[in-house]
Amino acid sequence: MAFTATLSRSNAGATYSAIVTVGMALIIGGALCFEHIGGYLPCHLCLIERNPYYFGIPLGIIALLASVYRLPVWITRALLVVIGVMMLIGAGIGAYHAGVEWGFWAGPSSCTSPAGPATTNAGSLLSTLNAVHGPQCDQAALRILGVSLAGWNVVAGVVLGAIAFIGARKAA
């Protein structure tokens, strides 16, 4: 609280834009590290959960630049509101995904069907590749402190959304 009180009104938009943009980049960077370094393949819903971050990071950079170059304040505010809404949508998708993992409701049929069989015949490789599906959405690949990555995405989306909305309110 003391940190935000010391921010001058002219720097608030840039500060909050930078915080939310770096936060989004860290979250998506972490997801990509789990995928490419840790070997945790994302399911269909995991990939959908990333979209708000992929679209939000460029908007955050634009909001930061708009604030730094002293463009009209409504631009920074509007971009931060859009980012906040996108993060809440991402949190909603994460909540849906976590509910699918816990069995509260059925997930999409495209990612809850069993995976296809492995092939041992090189002649049928192409047809087998068309039948193979990614990981199932109803099985958490990893739980940290008892919470799946989809659940942690809910937490991240709510926190980043709150930061974006606070920044939109304080930007002047």
Image (cartoon, rainbow, N blue to C red):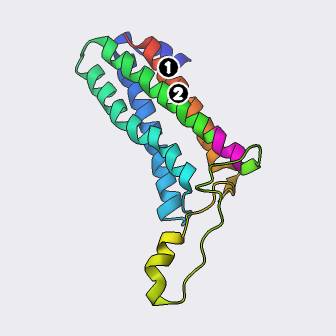
Position of residue 171 in the picture relative to residue 70 (left or right): right
Q: Secondary structure at mark 1?
A: helix
> Does the magenta run of residues contain 52?
no
Position of residue 31 in the picture relative to residue 66 (left or right): right
**Which residue is depicted at the point 49% across and 65% down?**
37
Q: Tell me if mark 2 has few (under 14), some (14-19) or many (20+) residues whose alpha carbon lies within 10 angstroms of its own.
A: many
**Which residue is depicted at the point 52% across and 27% down?**
161
In the displayed structure, 147 sits above or below 64; it is: below
3D distance between C-alphas at marks 2 and 1? 6 Å
Q: Secondary structure at mark 2?
A: helix
Q: Is residue 146 visible?
A: no
In the displayed structure, 19 sits above or below 138; it is: above
Where is mark 1, residue-wise? 165
**Amino acid type of the residue tagged 1 in the rendering:** Phe
Location of residue 53 (image quadrant): top left
User: Where is residue 160 drawn, in percent x and y?
Assistant: 52, 31
Main structural element of the magenta stretch: helix, strand or loop? Answer: helix
- Picture disc at residue 161: 2
User: Where is residue 92 drawn, in percent x and y?
Assistant: 60, 34
Q: Tell me if mark 1 has few (under 14), some (14-19) or many (20+) residues whose alpha carbon lies within 10 angstroms of its own.
A: many
The answer to whether the residue labelled 2 contacts the one labelled 1, judged by CB atoms less than 8 Å apart, is yes
Q: Quadrant of the N terminus?
A: top right
User: Where is residue 93 drawn, in percent x and y?
Assistant: 58, 39
Give the residues drawn in magenta, as a range. 95-100
In the displayed structure, 156 sits above or below 165; it is: below
In the displayed structure, 37 sits above or below 171; it is: below
Location of residue 22 (image quadrant): top left
**Amino acid type of the residue tagged 2 in the rendering:** Gly
Circle count: 2
